[in-house]
Amino acid sequence: MVDLLHADVLGGWVAFVLTLMVFSYLLGDNPLFRLAEHLFVGVAVGYAVVVVWRTVLVPRLWTPLATDPVANWPFLVPLLLGLLLLARVRARWSWWANLPMGFLFGVGAALSIGGALLGTLYPQVRASLISLNPASYGGQWGGVVDAAILAVGTLGTLLYFYFTAAREGRGVAGGIRRAWVAVGRWTLLVAFGALFAGATISRLSLLIARVQFLWNQIWSLIP
Amino acid sequence: MIYCPNCGTANRDGSKFCNECGARLAAPSTGIACPECGTFNPVTRLFCQKCGARLVTVAPEPEPEEPEGVPVTGFSLPSRLLETPPEAEAEGPAAGEEGALIPEWLTGLEPEAAGEEPVQEVPAAPLEEEHLPDWLRELRSGLGAVPEGESVEEAPPEVPAAPPGEGPGWLRELRSGVGAVPEEEAVEEAPPEVPAAPSEEEGVPDWLRKLRASLPPLEEEGEEVPPPAWLTEEGAAYPQVPVFAEPAVGAEGPLPEEAPSPLEAEAPGAAEALPLEIPPWLEGLEEEAAEEVPPPPPPGEQVSPPWLVGPTPEEIRAPGEAAEAVPPPVEAPLEPGRAEAEEEEMLPEWLRVPPPPPAEAVPAARVPEEGEAVPGEIPPWLAPFSPLARGPAAEGEEGTGLLQGISGLVPAVPEVLEVREEKAKGPAPSPVGASEANLFRQVLAEPPPEEPPARPKAKRFPLWGRWLVSLLLLAAVGIPTVWNGVTGRPLLNLRPAVPPAVQALYAAVEQVQPGEAVLVGWDVDPASAGELLPLAEAILGHLMQRGARLFVVSQLPAGPPLAQETLDGLARTQGVYTYGAHYLNLGYLPGDELGLRALSGAGGLAALDRDYVQGKALAQWEAAAGVRGVDDFRLIVVLASDAQQVRRWIEQVGAQHGVPLVAGVSAGALPALQPYHETEPRQLAGLAGGTPGAAAYESLRGVYLAGQSSMEALAGGVLALAFIVIVGNVALLFGLGRQGE
């Protein structure tokens, strides 16, 4: 029986070596990086299979059917649908797998649409109907400016994606429309920039975590 | 349907490639090539199954000069291997005269030597009835429809009695019987009705069985020679070569439809042929024929062999007299090695795809080599049907195409052809179109312009540059980390800014009273743990500090063990905070939206009725007391690295219940989720993102944990990235990166 402490220590050093193998990609593609990559994918998939078998299939499907199949006969329906998914292994039988896939996609799409309407679309549209009256912000013009920027940016973004109307125009109206479309385009660029910055911060955080892990492993060797 | 030989997928008729795997589908072995598009069609089709063009543009029309009522729609030239003895060729005109009466393949049966070994029989490939061409079946049926009662006085001299020891067994037996019993007597003693033949002789014609039954047993031979295989086998085992037997007028009983040739040569190999031997009994026939050579026919008169001409009225006896034995029908010999030929070869010559025209005309006097296939001779009476005749095209005879040489055909419908031509040609081009077409021709005629020199490829970022960037970034991140790890205190003592969303999150947690249940959506896996664990430790530690009962559920398979490890670590720092009494791990919840809807539905926690650690029912745990559904929770905390995961919780759980929902997400998902915190009422009561959010939350709590300890490293990394971006843009501005352009 391996001591848990020893297992943790061993696992920590295995992770240390694998981390260095991944960092070896800085030297170019090499077998060490490939080995670590394949190990990560294989272990992740294998672990997911074990978790699904242990926490889903056995306790929530096999056990009810094995203990009282008459009372738990509805569990046969998901079992049958799950078995039909295995028909993907042969091309001539693969269309049988369309039944459970259609069921899953249909129910999932219905729930997604319903949830998006009530949870995202309606609240967000309602939140965009803001007032520009300073009284609504307690007399602070900062709130008014903030609301104005939000309104102009939202409408400009909508105009930018309004492809059916001519963006070019003459006169004052055409100039305003072109300017508004430009504002919408820059609003999109700012939003994308914020997303990119967030992703960069996220990856930097992951790098920091790995560097801290490596240092802690090395520091643990120092008496 | 055509089934793919590779994957078995059923494809439409006419498909060339499999719709599933793309493998080439087997083309039909026989068919009629469409004159329009070249598609092979089954021989039973009149129109092309691809373009609809008419495959056979003619219909059979009875000719008035047709002597027989048998419709002959085509004729397949029999082919055989002919090995003509040099002696026979040297005969010259005599053989030619005889060939006018007898086909050449019969004239080639000259006796070579009486002592030679008889030719062995070759059982030809079985010929099924459906494989026969229509014209052959009709011809056979026509031959069998000869009226009964008519008889011939004498058997044609082409089938004389053969001396013993020559020819196949059945022929020797027949010959011996004929020699022992006078013909008239034998025929008169023949029973009027032919008894049922034994099963093993079903393939023997009735007239032969009758004759054999009337003959005495073979006594001259030392041992009985079994009949040839083609005679004892079923009728389907007959050779495939069409047989043109003489209509045996007057023969009693059904006429033999076909019979194998007794002179078939056995093929020792696929392309090797044995010479056709002439038994000695045919020598006598030749001598008799030489004595009774008829006078040469007048010029212009068509001469047919006597056996084909049939009996004259004087030769016809009165009804009731016994009929003479009908000679065995003569069959054209098979080509050796062609027994396993493809099905396509069964088609008549005129139905096959015409071969390309020969470059040079083959000399007519060329002597065929041994083993070479040569076309058989056509009797004169069949000459009008020969498609190979190259005389001036008669009226109604096809001059070109696949049906070249076939006469008596209905001409093609001109309207259809004209319409198709009109469609193919299209309207006359306008002047503008004609000028554009000319311009297009000129462009095509011009030589292609010389290609510009290949653009030099842009230089890749050098490896040393990659290392420089990596080392710079590693130093910016590593130095604060090492400093913090060695000294235990921050390098620059940066104080993080606290956004309002984080303050709202902190306030929401502060409102949780001891003992209240809090549902934690743990959508954190090892891939995102480096960023989210500091935030999770900050929030969950705060909740534990508040004495909340935590229920953790994850929609990622790798989430539950990581959550358990984190909770156990936090519980150890909180003192009296144990699993089962203060927190529970509900494990993995599959199904994304479906799982969350099941959790927030009427069933509530019934979707997660057992814990992850010990697999016990939730009712057995102290922490689960009084908690049945989502409404029983005081707060919902979602920890996720993806904005979509938080959005699912908002849409499927938060929008369905009035439970406040807060989220701790990665920095990349923060901008996409910020609008949910800006709504009124707030869909996200609080929001914190990434390491900055963790540091801000820790600062609100007044603790220095992983979030704040990582902020200096994060700041260093951001500064390094900004430096790299600025230097890169400056380099690009001065043309350093444009070397390859």
Image (tube, rainbow, N blue to C red):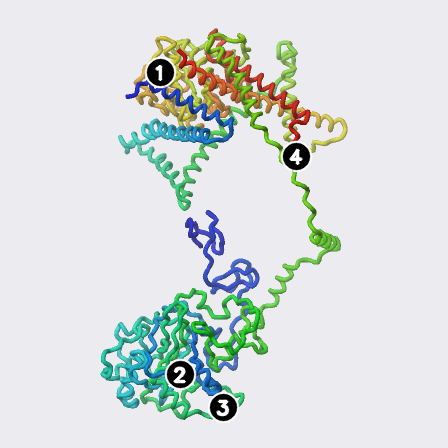
Subunit bearing disc 2: B
Could you tell me the amino acid type at mark 3? Answer: Pro
In depth, the one of B56 and A151 nearer the eye is: B56
> Which-is-in-front pick, marks 3 and 1?
3
Which mark, residue B297? 3
How many neighbours does mark 2 have within 10 angstroms: few (below 14), some (14-19), or many (20 or more)?
A: many
Neighbor class of circle 4 (other Cα within 10 Å; few <14, some 14-19, many 20+) is few
Figure quadrant of the N terminus of chain B: bottom left
Where does the C terminus of chain B fall, quadrant-wise?
Answer: top right
Q: Nearer the viewer, mark 1 or mark 4?
A: 4
- Return the mark for residue A164: 4
Q: Can residue B681 be spotted in the picture?
A: no
**Extreme right residue here?**
A171
Same-chain status of marks 4 and 3 = no
User: Label 4 sits on what residue type?
Assistant: Thr
Q: Earlier in the sequence, mark 2 or mark 1?
A: 2
Query: How far apart in space, not on screen, are marks 4 and 3 (Cα)?
Result: 95 Å
**Disc marking residue B110:** 2
Tell me the residue that label 1 is attached to. B626
Tell me the CA gap for discs 1 and 4: 57 Å
On screen, residue B586 above or below A79: above
- What chain letter is assigned to the residue under label 3? B
Give, as a three-letter code, the residue at label 2: Glu
